[in-house]
Image (tube, coloured by chain):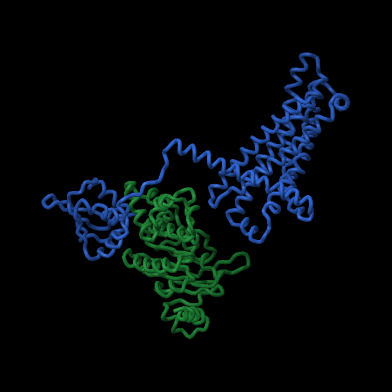
Amino acid sequence: METSNFDFNFSTTNNKIELLGNLNKSSLPKLISFINNNLKYTIDLKKLHHVDSCSLIYLISLEKQGSILINNKFKDLYEHYKRYYLDEIPKEKGNKNFIENIGKTTYKNLQELKVFIIFLGELFYYFFYSLIKPNKIRFKEMLKYIDASGIGALGIITLTSFLVGIVIAYQGAVQLEKFGANIFIVEMICITMFREIAPLLTAIVIAGRTASSYTAQIGAMKITEEVDAMKTMAFEPTIFITLPRVFALFISLPLLVFFADVIAVGSGMIVAYIDLDITYAEFINRMYEEVGIKHFLIGIIKSIFFGIAIAIIGCYRGFQVRNNTTSIGKYTTKSVVNAIFVVIALNAIFSVILTESGL
Amino acid sequence: MNVIKVRNLYTSFDKNVIHNNISFDIKKNEIFGILGGSGSGKTVLIKQIVMLQKIQKGEIIFLNENLSNLTLKKEENLKLQFSYLFQFGALYSFLNVLENVQVILKEYTKLPKDLITKIALTNLNMVGLDISSAYLYPSQLSGGMKKKVALARALANQPKILFLDEPTSGLDPSSTIQFNDLIKKLKNTLDLTIIIITHDLDTIKSTLDRFIILKDTKIHFNGTLTQALESKDKITRSFLTFKKDSYANKN
């Protein structure tokens, strides 16, 4: 914007600053740097052609320190802004007290825990309710979510489990070859994959992919007040929103893990054939004889729990979204981080319990 | 002097024609209203003027610049000369009330920080917002308060032209009256040109200098309130007299 047509004359005889031309927000800094916060002069606006509100507010703020001569042209405007001018800047209510903050945070976390328990309680209540009245289950929605979070994830699950299968088999092959224990590659690949890697890997991929999408979907519905609209129409959000998603992952995650098992063992077979000269028939025979079905079942059963946990966390964080756009991002991040953490923690708990009980 | 000239503007979405060859002028220092039923293309028109939507056919001359061919520099310059008050405020949710008002001055001027704060507070005070809510975030405000903050933000920039999209919807009656007084006063004291989309009869009656009525893809009426009331045209008359009568009955 034009700054050129503003100027001021300063005369030392009567300590007067005479303003000329257009005083606006771009030309104002010139005057401010001249006055430099200690006004002992009179400012004369009589020859000023145009003035904007920013400059007027600045002049009003100087009024306490010096005098200002206003011509009739700007008098109304000056008086108008003077009426609303506030010299005191209100202080932000910050609480710097450390102990108070600890208390507040603890209380907030407890409240959040309470809300989560209520959410879980509602979920279980409506779960059993819908078992008694199966016509309340939203099958169509459920199928839609199975399609989105199960079938839609096949590509990435194929890729990740194939690559991880190759890596594990390849690293194992190098070590086993040293002992001449080539054939043990079969147990190594099958047990690690069935029992630990495939369920964990799939669950983590789904936590990143699906938990985030559930949170963002539900969060957007909260912001547009769709969830409230449902409540006023007596559509219970737990039945309409949460349960179909929980059922969807409950069903699709074990299937995805089975799929990941197949791909990972398949890629292990390829490596075993290329690196250790174990034919596919040998590999399958050995697997049939030596690898118990329990390893496979443990992986599948674990994944059911992972699926339920991921869906619950995704939905719960979605319902926590408040009416502003930043909170969607915040809770989506939280939901993914929590879901991944819970999957890993659950896996550790399963591992300890099952190993201790000799399975 | 015409601030905005719209010439033969044609807009359609798919096969749905919104504007069919409409032309009008907005003069400097007037309060200009854009009226019309829902879906008559008021918001689309105003969004084309502020460069939020593309012009399909025809041209818009805004402060002597043709909007269809602008350099980036000219576009930025033009954008700094007007403010737009969105229908639902469109405050930045990651900034608090005070920062929302300060942000454009902070970015585009070299004024000292505490002066910017004072400008922001004065503007907030002027639109009638309680200063104790200066540090609240938009999500903590009611719809009417958001609107007031948005107006303060639009005014703090000291625009030459102010676009208001349904400024009084969601305000309580006394705020509406205050708001109408405020824009009239601002227009006179600050040499503002104000373009308003409105349905509010109070605003139409008390503030508008001139207005257009959009109907069936055309400009159905273009003139002042007195002209509209004198006009023999049925639709214009029914549009206004109906409102006028209901207003009279209320009193």
Q: Quadrant of the N terminus of chain A?
A: bottom left
User: Closest to the observer: A207 or A182?
Assistant: A207
User: What is the quadrant of residue A200 in the picture?
Assistant: top right
Q: Which residue is at 62% across, 40% downward?
A: A336
Which x, y percent locates residue B68?
A: 48, 60
Report which quarter residue A169 is drawn in: top right
Q: Is residue A271 visible?
A: no
Q: Is residue A251 above or below residue B181?
A: above
Which residue: 26% across, 54% down? Answer: A59
Give the letter of the blue chain. Answer: A
Name which residue lies at 81% across and 20% down: A184
Closer to the camera, A348 or B7? A348
Residue B210 x, y percent position in the rendering: 41, 74
**In this view of the protein, can residue B11 be seen by the observer?**
yes
Question: In terms of image quadrants, where is residue A112?
Answer: top right
Task: Identify the residue at the far bottom of this view.
Answer: B232
Q: Nearer the viewer, residue A341 or A154?
A: A341
Which chain appears green?
Answer: B
Q: Where does the C terminus of chain A fall, quadrant-wise?
A: top right
In the picture as drawn, the residue positioned furthest to the top comes out as A179
Residues A35 and B25: in front is A35
The location of residue B194, given as percent across then percent down, is 40, 66
